[in-house]
Amino acid sequence: MSTVAPPPQESSDSTEVPELKVVTDATCTFCGCVCDDMELTVQDNKITKAKNACVLGKAWFLNHHIEDRPDATIEGQPASYEQAIERAADILSNAIYPITYGLSDTTCEAQRVAVAISDWIGGCVDTTTSVCHGPSGIAFQEVGEVTCTLGEIKNRADYIVFWGGNPAESHPRHFTRYSLMPKGQFLPNGRKDRTAVLVDVRKTKSARAADIFLQVKPRSDFELAWAMRAIAKGVEIDPSIEEQTGISLERLTEVVEGMKAAKFGVILFGMGLTMTRGKHLNSEAILSLARDLNKYTRWTAKPMRGHGNVTGADNVVTWQTGFPFGVHLGRGYPRFNPGEWTSSDLLARGEADAALIIASDPMSNFSQPARDHLEKIDSVVLDPKLSETAKTATVAFTTSTYGINTTGTVYRMDDVPIPLRPAFDSPYRSDYEILKAIEKRIREKQLNGNLSS
């Protein structure tokens, strides 16, 4: 809800003061925590205060401004929305092997339309999950997931393992709002009632908050998790495990026994686990460890997600196609094969002939062969900022920023949907509006083509 402060008293020598607006219970969409207790002060279409926001959230809100850019550009030249939508529809409907990529920084409503467009044109739909927690998505299909919400962690988790992540810097409010510090229904003393373990290849700022720090040797996460599984099951482990992982058998046994004695435990794992040697096998080992520990007590495992609505992208693509990312729709039904139909691989091999990029910047983080090919093909880009990808786009739309200017739904990292309360309007259209217009025009072209034939 929003409240408007009373107008200032008139005075003979005063100048006009811009209207002051306070938006309560706003949602921060910077990271996967999706904190929904922001109190934003807005003056003259600029956020001047962001109460309750962390350092990353404050940067997200306070540095936001409406850029003075054309509504859209075609080959770098200003164009109207109507002209750009027509050109975008031409590019996508005439493509033989189009890809749709991004989706992690937009609303679920826009994500649904993007999947629909991919279906109509028979292309591939992929999300940024394929270059971050994609291995976890594969692992979920292999061994399942013992899951919980962040609220359950806050109220119940007395033993928390952070593995391959640095929440103190990547998710600053996770410690204070969801995991380590808050007082919960069954943990009235907050931090004093919890044991925290950090597993990482180096000491980070998060290590200062942990009771136990296990410095695992690089590329040995799988061996460490598998050894912990064996200890939990009572299987004898060779002491040489220390040479492999850098952690002694005695230390490992101590940690596993502590995990077995917990009332409610959770393993929160990051990209330090999924993007090292082993990849999806590492995630499978962690998920299996959590499953095994349920023989003794209650244990869960959750990935620490980065972008504000990357979890929503996984959910939307999954409920629409049955798979979370890297989905090929060219045969009229969905097929899933990471490495073959993921965008970075398709582009690197030079296979895609058109691209729809939504709220993402692959020109800044894909491999050089993928970027070279993306620059050669026709692309349609939706982004509030003039990103590197937008600079090379055939058609580039300037969009409003979700959460700040646009309403809708996003998913927190624990799969809980959260509504957005925008702070102020943008002169630019939302991703959803543009994608709906593109979808409508594609369908009109397809129907007209069928009638004429």
Image: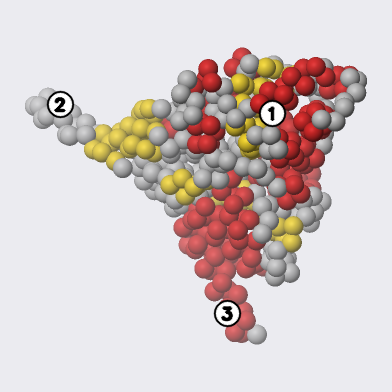
Residue holding disc 3: 448
Q: Which mark is residue 260?
A: 1
Residue 66 visible here: no
Q: Position of residue 94 (x, y in %)?
A: 67, 67
Q: Earlier in the sequence, mark 1 or mark 3?
A: 1
329 left or right, relative to 64: right
Q: Please, what secondary structure does the residue beneath circle 1 have?
A: helix
Residue at x 87% of width, y 22% of height: 241
Q: CA distance from mark 3 to mark 2?
A: 62 Å
What amino acid type is highlighted by mark number 1?
Lys
Residue at x 74% of width, y 19% of height: 254
Q: CB of mark 1 within 8 Å of CB of mark 3?
A: no
408 left or right, relative to 378: left
Q: Earlier in the sequence, mark 3 or mark 2?
A: 2
Residue at the far left: name it. 12
* Category of crowding for the residue at label 1, using alpha-carbon neighbours closer than 10 angstroms: few (below 14), some (14–19), many (at least 20): many
What amino acid type is highlighted by mark number 2?
Ser
Q: Please, what secondary structure does the residue beneath circle 3 have?
A: helix
174 left or right, relative to 203: left
Residue holding disc 2: 14
Q: Nearer the viewer, residue 35 or 17?
A: 35
The part of the image, by quadrant, that contains residue 240 is: top right
For discs 2 and 1, the disc positioned in front in the rendered view: 1
